[in-house]
Image (tube, helix red, strand yellow):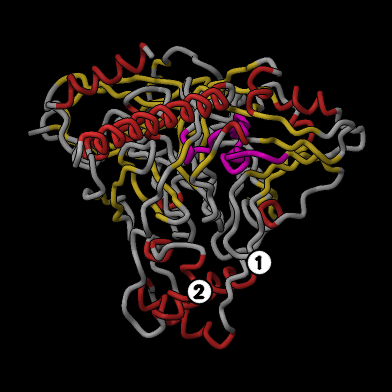
């Protein structure tokens, strides 16, 4: 966490010279739910509240609970602290009491040896593996879609980067002995719908994805047990894939020989089949299940409307990530994309995680600056300069613009 | 209170404390291999449905599964869009919205968070 300490120190050191932090600062310091923030879109008023095992976070909804990470957190450290990590449940029947001694993970379906695995067995019976990976909600940034679309109205804080530790799914599947006819693996957790007519939350991966080296049954997050609201005691971790597949409180694995016909695969969490995952508003297009993360980058040390040094070199810092090919480069512009310079990349702390970048620009008294960053992944993916659109508000990854001004 | 009664109470309290300590030890021994149990209490709904014709329909049907903040965090939606949401809740999620109540619910939602 050396980088984390340095980043925090930097924030404290320059805080006095950067204005406009009003939106983000109370989120860190707040001790009660009395404070509010205004996210920058219509109906963006939110309260901040400290839920169990959490610092004050932005309350999107209270039941089922959905909590957004205040964006300033992403400047604290590259690993998102557990108590600041976003929360998103689909169904109100979330167990509020979990005894890991009673935990049992069922492995069933097209396997030679169906099994029920305790948490102790998961911890000690399989070689532990670790991966640092970004967990991003499919609908992260949905509030910025134009035209607006219904759904969870997140700003950019429905994401987080953590070091996950657990058993490899492939090892658990291998011990059970997957049949040659197997095609998909379906996952479900301990949360339950309120109504009999609401589909239970289940997600499926093709067998070849499930067998990936980095897919974990995680029982630790940043060196600690997961917060209950993030899926304690075990969460599926699918690096590079959207969080909808990272099933929380995972307790059932079913190996199957058919595509999943469950609502959460066939109706929900689908995106246009076109490579851009986009469509024109008002059109109907063929869709496929959402899968891998788009490449994104953000400025983390400045907030919109900040006033920067009236004359001098202004340091800019941020994060970039993609679905796991890695970040090849980040370009930075201080003039709304008219000219670009290459940012310096921080240490590579894992191809699935946040990659730090830094740049600077010269400020002159009274001038305004439209700051932009644009990442390119190792596999060649880039961020569109103009936002693309889809009917469900998924996978936003446009180049964002952050306006600041130098004092006159 | 007489001395012997007080002594009896103190002895009982000590025994109870010992018993509790033994239970706690047994319990933690059982959970050590897997880690401690976690129990949380979630706060009540942060928001309820505002006044208006149809409020009781929203209260009776929508809040079975979710708090009213699901409605108010949305961007303002047209009547057609709110109808789409109501029908999705009814058909995809099994909300017990009576067919005769759909129009009134849509109008209520438009009144709470709608646009032309």
Vertical order, A38 against A31 (above or below): below
Residue A319 in which image quadrant: top left
- Give the chain letter at badge 2: B
The label shown at residue A122 is none
Residue A56 falls left or right of residue B102 = left
CA distance for labels 1 and 2: 13 Å
Is residue A221 visible in the rendered image? The answer is no
Residue A285 picture location, percent across and down: 67, 59
Does dot 1 land on a helix, a strand or a loop? loop
Residue at the limit of the structure toward the bottom, as seen here: B100
On the same chain, marks 1 and 2? The answer is no
Residue A291 picture location, percent across and down: 65, 40
Residue A316 falls left or right of residue B25 = left
Whether residue A245 is in magenta: the answer is yes
Over which residues does the magenta segment extend? A227-252
Residue A168 falls left or right of residue A397 = right
Q: Residue at x 33, y 20 (%)?
A: A359
Does dot 2 land on a helix, a strand or a loop? helix
Name the residue beneath numbered marker 2: B61
Q: Residue at x 39, y 52 (%)?
A: A60
Name the residue beneath numbered marker 1: A197
Whether residue A200 is in magenta: the answer is no
């Amino acid at each position: 966490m050396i980088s984390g300490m340095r980043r925090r120190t930097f924030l404290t050191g320059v805080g006095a010279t950067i204005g406009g932090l009003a939106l983000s600062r109370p989120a860190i310091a707040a001790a009660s739910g009395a404070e509010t923030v205004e996210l920058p879109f219509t109906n963006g008023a939110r309260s901040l509240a400290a839920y169990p095992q959490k610092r004050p976070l932005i309350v999107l909804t209270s039941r089922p609970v959905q909590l957004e990470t205040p964006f300033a957190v992403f400047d604290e450290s590259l690993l998102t602290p557990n108590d600041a990590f976003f929360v998103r449940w689909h169904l109100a029947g979330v167990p509020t009491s979990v005894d890991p001694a009673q935990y049992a993970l069922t492995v069933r379906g097209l396997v030679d040896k169906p099994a029920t695995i305790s948490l102790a067995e998961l911890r000690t019976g399989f070689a532990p593996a670790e991966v640092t990976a970004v967990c991003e909600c499919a609908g992260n940034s949905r509030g910025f879609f134009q035209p607006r679309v219904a759904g969870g109205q997140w700003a950019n804080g429905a994401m987080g980067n953590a070091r996950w530790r657990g058993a490899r799914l492939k090892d658990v599947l291998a011990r059970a002995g997957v049949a040659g006819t197997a095609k998909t693996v379906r996952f479900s957790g301990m949360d339950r719908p309120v109504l009999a007519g609401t589909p239970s939350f289940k997600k499926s991966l093709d067998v070849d994805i499930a067998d990936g080296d980095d897919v974990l049954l995680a029982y630790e997050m940043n060196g600690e047990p997961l917060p209950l609201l993030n899926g304690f005691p075990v969460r599926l971790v699918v690096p590079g894939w959207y969080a909808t597949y990272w099933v929380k409180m995972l307790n059932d694995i079913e190996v199957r020989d058919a595509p999943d016909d469950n609502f959460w695969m066939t109706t929900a969490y689908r995106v246009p089949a076109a490579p851009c995952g986009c469509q024109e508003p008002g059109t109907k297009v063929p869709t496929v299940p959402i899968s891998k993360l788009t490449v994104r980058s953000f400025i983390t040390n400045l907030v919109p409307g900040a006033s920067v040094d009236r004359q001098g070199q202004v340091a800019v810092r941020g994060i970039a990530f993609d679905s796991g090919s890695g970040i090849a480069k980040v370009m930075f512009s201080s003039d709304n994309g008219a000219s670009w310079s290459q940012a310096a990349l921080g240490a590579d702390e894992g191809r699935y995680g946040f990659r730090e970048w830094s740049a600077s620009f010269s400020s002159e008294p009274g001038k305004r600056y439209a700051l932009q960053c644009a990442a390119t992944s190792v596999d060649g993916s880039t961020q569109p300069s103009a936002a693309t659109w889809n009917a469900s508000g998924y996978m936003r990854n446009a180049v964002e613009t952050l306006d600041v001004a130098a004092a006159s | 209170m007489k001395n012997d009664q007080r002594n009896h109470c103190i002895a009982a309290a000590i025994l109870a404390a010992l018993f509790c300590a033994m239970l706690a030890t047994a319990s933690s021994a059982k959970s050590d291999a897997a880690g401690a149990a976690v129990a949380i209490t979630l706060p009540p709904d942060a928001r309820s449905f505002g006044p208006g014709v149809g409020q009781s329909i929203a209260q009776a049907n929508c809040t079975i599964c979710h708090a009213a903040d699901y409605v108010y965090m949305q961007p303002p939606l047209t009547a057609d869009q709110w109808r789409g949401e109501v029908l999705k809740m009814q058909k995809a999620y099994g909300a017990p919205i009576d067919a005769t109540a759909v129009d009134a619910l849509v109008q209520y939602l438009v009144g709470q968070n709608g646009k032309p």
